[in-house]
Image (cartoon, coloured by chain):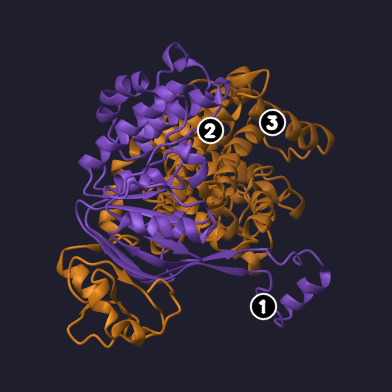
């Protein structure tokens, strides 16, 4: 369960003004006339409140820069709120370990490093190691440095590591399921599996069909605020598509499921 | 209902029943309100919820046993969390150490070459060109130990001052006690130091240093220094994270510290009267500063010539005091045999004291800002 109570997240950006280097501004700052002149605050989340329950799969949609990823990070406890708070039961974890991995190292070492970084014990790591390597399909390349991998291979291994741990509250940022068609199916199944194990799932996605299929709630964000949210996922998504100037989705009048004609994704992305 | 700018009261009247799920949950005095469980809320800062039967969100959350996700754990829990991450820290340190030299053609050989080249540079400048051996029996060994030991602390300081900035992606992606990062960085430096120690031992063996049981004292000396570095690393990591200009300033502070810590000269042989009786605290400060202590302990452990000439180590000091040529200011380096500033047998206490002080201060200082790292 997750309670978000009037959450505000502010990023502080240093040197955003571009006037840091000049002697005059430094002098002014030293004289105290223009204190911290080059710090700009970016108000990424501006007062969001909602409650998500156990068993909920919440889709978060919105344009680029609307604060979706920031919201996920705040739920994971990675960004301290400026105001308000996020309350969670159990550990919330982002699905993603890319940051912990080092491209110069072999895939093998990266698997171990990634697992340990996610908080697994040593035994757990060695237990899951074969499954991860197997899932990634990297095969004999596992003992080569990751920088020698093709981009598909690399992202497959990254996904395999990230998806190895089940979480109480699962936070999924978009574009995880990359790679060829076969791997996309595999990773989709793995995510569904993780969702089954997790109490609450948050999914940030530009692929709206994905949200429609898997989420029972949706939050539409714009500039750090909730525009609309609720359980009527399909209407909200349709409204969002209309608002962003996309072509209306063809739907079956009774089931409201999408009518598959040609490339659905290109119309909704 | 779709327009977020619609005044709250408009929504409350009538519409609410039709839209059911969308309850206006709103904040009164900074806390959101929840009309009834099971509903998502819309937040509208600056508006007051007219909802009388609403539950304050924060209370609701706490009632159901939820915890703030970005809450700082208690110091004890923090230590437990850190302990659980020990394998990660070691794996992370080893991985980074290996990755450091993968670009170079000579690869891991640089782990050994870097300290060797360091020594060569200092030996050339201070041993050959400036020739400042100042009566130190084996200046090359003396210099090598000093440089390697100080280098450990120096590198630990510099790398930990950047740790939060360097690891921003990691901090923003994964939840773990942030102190694991400076700790891992000090482990990296410790691993490098251990390789340097092998080089060091090889050099002093070539210089004809006898292998004795005293060498074992190098282990506790290094351990104390490592603990000191961890403590300072935590301290410096927070300073580096919160004061943007700190990492620019640090190299200058460290260089000053190096020249004051007897890397290139012997602070040990400075007497109470070396700078005149009125300034005897200068000598005490020089000798009691942690870098000088760890260097001195390592020298005493590894170098026989240092052990034999150490002031206060009877009966040698008596003889050396008597041999103090002319007892003039020019030869102040050996005056300590007559009037040592500190009792050398207390060095271990000072060294342990510094290590403990640094560790405790550093830990609490770093822990205190735990939730603020990665925000910038």
Query: Contact (CB < 8 A) between labels 3 and 1?
Result: no
A249 displayed left or right of B136: left
Q: Say whether disc 3 or disc 2 marks the residue closer to the N-terminus.
A: 3
Q: Judging from the image, what is the letter of the chain drawn in orange?
A: B
Quadrant including the C terminus of chain B: bottom right
Look at the numbered disc 2 and give the secondary structure of its residue: helix
Mark sitting on residue B193: 2
Measured along the vertical axis of the image, is residue B297 above or below residue B141? below
Give the foreground label among 3 and 1. 1
Query: How far apart are labels 3 and 1 at the CA level?
Result: 44 Å
Residue at image mark 1: A35
Residue at position x 68%, y 54% from top? Answer: B256
Give the letter of the chain under mark 1.
A
Hue used for the chain lettered A: purple
Measured along the vertical axis of the image, is residue A197 above or below residue A59? above
Q: In the image, residue A191 lies at what x, y percent?
A: 31, 37
Query: How far apart are labels 1 and 2 at the CA level?
Result: 42 Å
For the residues beneath circles 3 and 1, the answer to whether they share a chain is no
């Amino acid at each position: 369960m997750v309670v978000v109570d009037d959450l505000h997240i502010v990023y502080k950006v240093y040197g955003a003004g571009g006037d840091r280097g000049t002697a005059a501004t430094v002098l002014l700052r030293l004289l105290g006339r223009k204190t911290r002149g080059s710090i700009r605050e970016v108000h990424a989340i501006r007062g969001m409140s909602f409650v998500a329950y156990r068993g909920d799969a919440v889709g978060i949609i919105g344009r680029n820069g609307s604060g979706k990823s920031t919201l996920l990070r705040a739920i994971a406890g990675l960004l301290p709120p400026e105001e308000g708070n996020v309350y969670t039961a159990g550990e919330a974890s982002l699905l993603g370990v890319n940051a912990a991995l080092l491209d110069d190292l072999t895939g093998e070492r990266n698997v171990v490093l990634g697992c340990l970084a996610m908080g697994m014990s040593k035994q757990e790591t060695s237990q899951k190691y074969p499954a991860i390597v197997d899932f990634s399909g990297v095969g004999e390349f596992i003992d080569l440095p990751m920088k020698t991998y093709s981009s598909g291979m690399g992202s497959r291994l990254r996904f395999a590591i990230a998806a190895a741990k089940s979480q109480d509250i699962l936070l999924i940022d978009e574009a995880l399921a990359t790679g060829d068609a076969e791997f996309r199916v595999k990773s989709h199944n793995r995510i569904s599996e993780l969702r089954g194990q997790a109490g609450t799932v948050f999914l940030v996605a530009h692929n709206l069909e994905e949200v429609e299929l898997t989420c029972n709630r949706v939050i539409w964000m714009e500039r750090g605020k909730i525009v609309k949210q609720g359980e009527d996922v399909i209407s909200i998504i349709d409204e969002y598509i209309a608002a962003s100037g996309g072509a209306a989705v063809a739907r079956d009048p009774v089931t409201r499921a999408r009518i598959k004609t040609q490339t659905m994704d290109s119309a909704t992305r | 209902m779709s327009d977020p700018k619609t005044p709250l009261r408009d929504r409350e009247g009538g519409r609410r029943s039709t839209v059911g799920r969308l309850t206006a949950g709103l904040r009164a005095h900074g806390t959101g309100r929840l009309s009834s469980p099971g509903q998502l809320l819309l937040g509208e800062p600056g508006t007051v919820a007219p909802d009388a039967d609403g539950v304050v969100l924060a209370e609701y959350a706490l009632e159901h046993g939820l915890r703030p996700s970005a809450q700082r754990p208690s110091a004890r829990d923090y230590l437990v969390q850190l302990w659980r991450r020990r394998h990660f820290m070691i794996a992370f340190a080893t991985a980074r150490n290996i990755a450091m030299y993968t670009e170079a053609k000579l690869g891991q050989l640089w782990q050994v070459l870097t300290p060797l080249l360091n020594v060569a540079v200092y030996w050339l400048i201070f041993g050959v060109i400036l020739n400042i051996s100042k009566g130190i029996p084996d200046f090359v060994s003396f210099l090598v130990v000093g440089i390697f030991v100080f280098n450990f602390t120096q590198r630990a300081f510099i790398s930990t001052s950047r740790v939060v900035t360097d690891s921003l992606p990691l901090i923003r992606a994964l939840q773990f006690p942030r102190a694991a990062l400076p700790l891992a960085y000090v482990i990296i430096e410790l691993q490098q130091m251990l390789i340097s120690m092998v080089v060091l031992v090889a050099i002093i063996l070539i210089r004809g240093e006898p292998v004795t049981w005293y060498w074992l004292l190098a282990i506790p000396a290094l351990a104390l220094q490592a603990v000191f570095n961890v403590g300072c690393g935590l301290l410096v990591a927070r300073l580096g994270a919160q004061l943007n200009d700190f990492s620019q300033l640090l190299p200058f502070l460290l260089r000053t510290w190096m020249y004051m810590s007897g890397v290139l000269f012997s602070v040990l042989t400075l007497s109470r009267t070396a700078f005149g009786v009125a300034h005897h605290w200068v000598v005490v400060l020089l000798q009691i500063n942690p870098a000088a202590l760890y260097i001195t302990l390592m020298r005493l452990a590894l170098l026989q010539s240092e052990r034999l000439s150490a002031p206060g180590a009877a009966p040698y000091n008596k003889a050396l005091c008597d041999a103090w040529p002319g007892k003039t200011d020019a030869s102040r380096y050996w005056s300590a045999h007559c009037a040592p500033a500190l009792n050398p047998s207390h060095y271990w206490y000072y060294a342990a004291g510094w290590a403990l002080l640094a560790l405790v201060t550093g830990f609490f200082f770093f822990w205190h800002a735990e939730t603020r790292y990665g925000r910038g």
